Image (cartoon, rainbow, N blue to C red):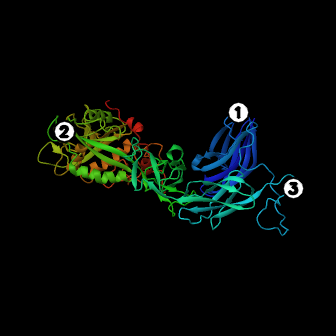
Amino acid sequence: MATLTISRIRCTEQEDWTGDDAIQIVVHGSSRQVVWEGAMDTGQTRELSGIEVEFSGSVRIQLMEEDWPDPDDDLGSVTVSESGSAAVDVEGRFTGDDANYTVWYRVSTAEDGPAESTVPECTPADPPDESSDASGPVSEGDATSGDGTAPCPMGNLGVTVRDSDGNAIQGADVRVVETGATGVTGPDGSHDFGPLPEGEYNVEGSKEGYSPNPGSTTAQVTSGTTSTAEIVLSTVIVRVTPSGDQKWYVNETPNQAGHHGREITIRAQVTPAVAGVRIHFRLVRGANNNSGLTGNHRASLSPASALTNASGEATTTLTLSDYGGDEFRVSASLNAGDAPGSAGTAQTGRLMVWKKLYFDVVEMYKSGNSGPVYEWKSSIERRVIGDATHAFENVFVELQDTGQRHQGRHVDNFAQPSDGFTWADNYTDPAGVPLKIHFCVVDRAFPSSGTYGPTDTAYTENFPNSSANPFRSTGRILVHEFNGIQPIVRAEYQHGGSWVTLAAGKVTMVSGRGRRQFEVDFSGAAHTPTAASAVPVRVTYKKAFGAGGWGGSDSLHLLICRGHYEDEAAVGNLSGTPDGQIIVACIHEPGHALGLVSSSEPYHDSSHRSHCTRNSCTMWYQSSVGNEAFHDASTAHAACCRTFLRAADLSRSVMQSKWNFPR
């Protein structure tokens, strides 16, 4: 059977941001016992008495912080073994949930007997009667005990704590190890412990910001005299790194030198280089951070304090949040209660949460497997590094050009995204995968089926007299003429109040690309346009949906349809220039690849899947020049395209699922 005695508790850094911690010391042995409860504040020490628990084998000391109505916070545990008893005080550290507590305890057994001491075994004299006129130092000759036993020879013990320059240190904690007597030094750096039996005593003194902590010395108490223990503590200066503002790319493979990964080693250096100095670290969050993060998405700092090594260095680990744009500093101090930025503290620079992606380019030949290509152009490259990168920098994603450029054989049209992605596989350098976007500048992407497949559409125009038959339309239509689909469904003209069907082949498309005119052959028809009367003609055709680009959440191949943009520009049907539209596509399509717009989002456009309802957003289904930004919410961090991308998981494991390379 052993006895656990708990004698003291110190709070170096409390768990709650505001108010005192409501602390419980819980001992888990044959049953759960709450042996002490009390309020604690940073920098506070409480002497405990009468806390003894008998046990066999081992017990666990647990520190809890009550957090009603939320669950209580577990600040950590220490397991104490009967076999490891030494009948001396031991320090238990409790640093859970960013708190920092120390509990002093000892374990003793019946076999331990009393601890060795240089203090004589005798009975101290009773204290003098305050009503008497007795004064002066205690004399061994006149000390008597209340029970008649032989009195101890008595003397006085005091302590003085100074710094290395001889200046008094006020507010230092001092303690006599053998008796457990404690005190705090006054303005002159001294404290009087009063009368003690003569003998040798170990005296400790400590104060945050000084080294060593604690300092100690021995003092010999002699009968009838006052002995003073002298303790010298040295001031130390703290510096902390990293010192400058830095972007940290949390989706990259951890690499401290490259500022990659979520974990950052924070180093505090004390001068002079002294071992055993406790450094207190505190996490300082940016004012505009997302405070709604939970679980592993949150930032953390551990440990909250650490002792310097022989080189005078102490370290802690900052785990950044994974929300783009959050920023943090870490404050280091010798005093647990120092506010970050106050005198005597040191702070890192701003450590900002970013993510990084790379890109390369493949340009499709305009014909065959050689010759001119659908160009990416240096001017577009500059714009992507400017406009597109600005759009992504606004969501704290850095796009970096790999410089890789490839050319690919011509394909007239991609009828399905998978056709284009398979083509792109042939021209992708796997270097940089999976954190790499592959911009593919191609001809056209007219879907052959599905939501954006060809639809039967009627176009009507009045045909006036002209010099020759066949008659050519003034308007233009965009027909789907790929994959064996016949673009003209039927053609009719109006005669006598009714629509009359023209024979097959009487309507033909004028040669060319994109939106084109058509010709109507009226030979054999019952009515022909004349100068006096025009003839209404109605053509039902397979209307094509011309995609400006294709991207999806399951691929990082992004198709940019320069051929289609050039066709639209040639007939004046393009807002802006082909280059300008490509810039928008180079923002819009990566947005799809990174998960926009999920059907679960409140701004999802149910009529145009994977797009945003905001017509000012680059993720709108008809985004054009002027739509170069992801829409933001009026409330910080509320649901919107910008918030989605700031929170997006762009880690290698997630991005790898989008790279089925080769297919």
Check residue 365 in the rendering and tell me which mark sits there, or answer none. 2
Check residue 146 in the rendering and tell me which mark sits there, or answer none. 3
Q: Is residue 638 left or right of residue 207?
A: left
- First in residue order: circle 3 vs circle 1: 1
The percent coordinates of residue 192 (x first, y second) are: 70, 62
Residue situated furthest right in the rendering: 148
The percent coordinates of residue 110 (x first, y second) are: 76, 37
Task: Identify the element where label 3 is drawn.
Answer: loop
**In front of the other: label 3 or label 1?**
3
Residue situated furthest bottom in the rendering: 133
Residue located at (25% from left, 49% from top): 381
Under mark 2, the amino acid is: Tyr
Task: Identify the element where label 1 is drawn.
Answer: loop
**In front of the other: label 1 or label 2?**
1
- First in residue order: circle 1 vs circle 2: 1
Depth check: 247 or 307 in front? 307
Query: Compared with residue 286, is residue 365 higher up or lower down, i.e. above or below?
Result: above
The percent coordinates of residue 596 (x first, y second) are: 41, 44
